Image (cartoon, rainbow, N blue to C red):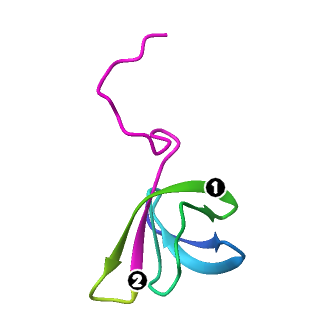
Amino acid sequence: MGWVSVTVSVGKEEIEAMFNGIQVDVPGDVKIGESLKVDGVDYKVINTIQDNRDPVTHVILATAKDKGEKSDDESIKG
């Protein structure tokens, strides 16, 4: 997925941001909690990285595949 413009909801605040499927870049002054909404879809925040070159925070999101959980490298038999 390429970068697309999205609306991010952080608490009661809505901001425009760029999203590539796993990372959303928001202005550096926005306070990020444990989760946020991207175009109305809830995502769990895995990590935030402050960019020292620009006033931007890179927010790494859990995808539907990983759901934000760490792998234990054990196969799941069903």
Magenta-drawn stretch contains 68: yes
At x 27% / y 86%, what residue is drawn? Answer: 52
Asked where in the image residue 50 lies, by quadrant, the reply is: bottom left
The image shows residue 9 at horizontal and vertical percentages of: 65, 71
Q: Which label belongs to residue 42? A: 1
Label 1: how many Cα within 10 Å (few below 14, some 14–19, many 20+): some
The image shows residue 71 at horizontal and vertical percentages of: 34, 34
Q: Residue furthest top?
A: 78
Pointer 2 with pointer 1, Cβ within 8 A: no
Magenta-drawn stretch contains 52: no
Q: Which label belongs to residue 56? A: 2
The three-letter code of the residue at mark 1 reads Asp
Who comes first in sequence, dot 2 or dot 1?
Answer: 1
Give left or right: position of 24 versus 8: left
Instruction: Look at the image and give the residue range highlighted in magenta.
Output: 57-78
At x 49% / y 87%, what residue is drawn? Answer: 29
Label 2: how many Cα within 10 Å (few below 14, some 14–19, many 20+): some
- Main SS class of the magenta portion in the image: loop
- Secondary structure, mark 2, is strand
The image shows residue 28 at horizontal and vertical percentages of: 44, 85
Asked where in the image residue 14 lies, by quadrant, the reply is: bottom right
The image shows residue 49 at horizontal and vertical percentages of: 34, 71
At x 61% / y 71%, what residue is drawn? Answer: 8
The three-letter code of the residue at mark 2 reads Val
- Secondary structure, mark 1, is strand
Out of 70 and 21, give the one closest to the viewer.
Answer: 70
Vertical side of 46 occupied by 66: above or below: above
